[in-house]
Amino acid sequence: MAEIVFGLGTSHTPQMSSTVEMWEDHAKRDQGNPELLAADGEYWKYDDLLKVADPGLAAELTDEVWNRRYERAQECVGILAKALADARPDVVVIIGDDQEELFDDGGTPAIGLFVGEEVWDRPLVGERKARLEKFPGLVAAQWAAHGPQPTPHRVERDLSYHLAAQLTLMDFDLTLVSEQPVTRTLGHAFTFPRYRLHLPETTPIVPVLLNTYYPPNVPSATRCYDLGRAIRRAVESWDSDKRVAVVASGGLSHFVVLPEWDRMVLDAMAKHDRDAFAAIPRKMFRSGTSETLNWITVAGVFEQGTMELIDYLPGYRTPAGTGTGMAFATWR
């Protein structure tokens, strides 16, 4: 039977993949974002956040701190890349969220599973490209999200179909996708492992696509944890001798950095505390912070394992406390 040999969680914010000189440009996006999810689970405007922000945040915005955080993030990505390579997986299950990349208003499943032979990363075009090009920081970070030309990512179809069958028997309702419209691309949550973690082109993936961003059909934290449990049982029942790794891509808090909340969630993952996830108000899993659900799913996969937090970096980029809570972890 197949064996799950390794797991990891990584943030994939553009802050990590553009130079630190671009952090001010990322900050400009925050200033124009009317839906900044704060610690109370409500959306705030930038100017309102700024009025109540801790003046001590100024110490987080120096060149020295920014460079130290950026360099440490690069080190963490390197640690994860080496650990993934050392695990020698034959296939990698990626738990990520789709942000109207593969899906659109024509259909957004709560839990999607790609079962085709390959899924393509395609450069952004049209309106999406035009929106991105308004911000040089996003342009600078595109190499970590999309290649300059269409690129196929192999899919382990046997495992995808096996997961579909087994998860359905465990009462998970899935949407299966076997064909990709030529106008759609694989999302950045799923391309990040290849472009930043150096996952070889020859290593097939299984994309598990969670709808974290778009209410109302966002699965709860406990549903995601239970999905992770079920994925483990399904993978271990797969009639194969292949080694399987599982990756959580995205998170943690953004676009307001919530270090206390992030630490609480990371602690709950390390302690396998499903009750703690159940106690988190669902409104906290919105905007970019919703990607934490990808991590909680992988925490469920490794309920009987050990989580090692490599580092947590509060990536503040404005005096209002906006930015990204960057986290890096492994499971065994």
Image (cartoon, rainbow, N blue to C red):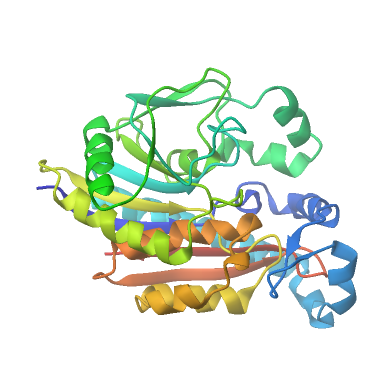
| Residue name at image x 60 percent, y 36 percent | 100
Name the spot of residue 290 as percent of width and height, x first: 57, 58
Between 297 and 251, which is closer to the camera in this rendering?
A: 297
Quarter holding residue 144: top right
Quarter holding residue 98: top right
Q: Is residue 267 visible?
A: no
| Left or right: 185, with 257 as reference point | left
How many marks can you see?
0
| Left or right: 28, with 191 as reference point | right
Name the spot of residue 231 as percent of width and height, x first: 28, 53
Q: Is residue 81 above or below residue 107?
A: below
Which quadrant would the C terminus be assigned to in this image? bottom left
Q: Is residue 44 above or below residue 214?
A: below
Q: Is residue 332 above or below residue 83?
A: below
| Left or right: 60, with 48 as reference point | left
Name the spot of residue 32 as percent of width and height, x first: 85, 52
Between 216 and 296, which is closer to the camera in this rendering?
A: 216
Q: Is residue 304 visible?
A: yes
Query: Furthest-top residue in view?
Result: 182
| Residue name at image x 59 percent, y 52 percent | 216
Between 212 and 110, which is closer to the camera in this rendering?
A: 110
Name the spot of residue 207 as percent of width and height, x first: 39, 40
Quarter holding residue 31: bottom right
| Residue name at image x 41 percent, y 59 percent | 224
